[in-house]
Image: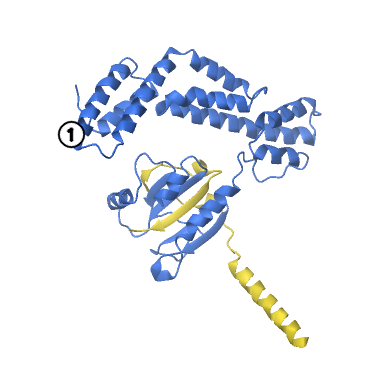
Amino acid sequence: MASLVKRYQEGPFHLIYGDCQRIGKEKMMDYMKTQGFSDDLKNFTLSQFPSHPEVKGNGHVPYYMVFDHTGKLRYDHMCGQYHGGDGMKCIEWVDTLVAEVPAIYFGEEDFKLHTELVKELETGENLAKGVKKVETALDEAETGSDSEAELTRIYAVLTSFRDNELARIENLRASDPEIVLDELKDLESRLKGTTLGEAVSAREEELSKSDDHKAERKIGDKFNKYKEKLDDETLSEKQRYKLLGQAAKALRKLTDDHPDLPISKTVEAWLTENRAPEE
Amino acid sequence: MLIRTLTMCLMLVAFAAAASAQAYDKDGSIDDLKLGEYFWGDEVTLEDLEQKVVLVQIAGL
């Protein structure tokens, strides 16, 4: 399961791992850590076992349910060696269903008048061209017409896509601020020449001139380099502790001047968690 | 000729039976999923799971 979650760290996938045998949080966490799960991993949740009205009578027997991106239950299966099941088939299901997810999801309601345009936009490719078509068509559409209603719906989805991308990039300031401007430039280029893209250009210009952002790029760059060095499994405990001390000194020199930046808080939490020596 | 036709019919019936055995007959939605008490990882709501493929793996150790 951990390798599946790792494979889809940036993908539209989430694993809910439910304890069905009342084993308890601590023992389950310990077990999952031995299987490759960690605090750094996203897109998974460990919980007490969830339930669904369509999947009944399984009691405390291992089983799985898989839902597609539209929320539809596509399969459930009682698995485990004692029940003749094939628990690992869930991996095939996940791969199949993730491949079905469009780059931009327009919902299940049909677009009768602009089907082809939506099919183009769903792929996420040549986005600027597609968005421009929608913007132009909206300007020219007759007020109150069915076409205008559909185009408005399409544009709302595109706006959500842009806003979600901006939010995703904004969140990177807490972990990888040194790539934020590149991500914004990439999104700007995908929406080049469109009204939708103007907010992206504005944010890119704002951050590129910001002294705070210059500081967080510097901190992020140093932080991620130290993390990479500390990931070296050939380091002895003594070497690791020494390197951690160097990291703490170098990073705190930068974060002390900017304690409120998202990356500074991440650095401090990481130094505490790794028991970096205090000066 | 008759035997050949009968054989083909039997094969078609077997194929249909196999195909229908593989069809999934439940009509469920993630909206009806009741999440259990959170322990570890991402603390999510059903809204957070929208537009994602969700695997709910119920197991023990």
Front-lying residue, A255 or B35: A255
Disc 1 on helix, strand or loop? helix
Q: Is residue A68 visible?
A: no
**Quarter assignment of residue A101:** top right
Label 1: few (<14), some (14–19) or many (≥20) C-alpha neighbours in 10 Å? few
Locate residue A233, reporting x and y percent.
Answer: 28, 40
A209 or A218, nearer to the observer = A218
The chain letter for the residue carrying disc 1 is A
Position above or below: A148 against B30: above
Q: Colour of chain B?
A: yellow
In this image, A141 relative to B19: left or right?
A: right
Q: Amino acid at mark 1?
A: Lys
Residue reaching furthest to the bottom: B2
Viewer-proximal residue among A198 and B9: B9
Indicate left or right for B6 with A39 as reference.
right
Residue lying at 64% horizontally and 35% vertically, measured from the top left:
A157
Q: Quadrant of residue A274?
A: top left
In the shown orientation, is residue A168 left or right of residue A120? left
Location of the C terminus of chain A (image quadrant): top left
Which residue is found at the position 53% from the left and 45% from the top? B52
Q: Quadrant of residue A248?
A: top left
Residue A77 placed where, x, y %?
A: 49, 63
Residue A25 x %, y %: 31, 50
User: Residue at position x 38%, y 19% from top?
Assistant: A218
Q: How is the image coloured?
A: by chain
Q: According to the image, label 1 marks what residue? A: A238
Q: Colour of chain A?
A: blue
Asked if one can make out residue A92 in the rendered structure from this viewpoint, the answer is: yes
Q: How many marks are shown on the rendered structure?
A: 1
User: What residue is at 51 percent from the left and 61 percent from the top?
Assistant: A76
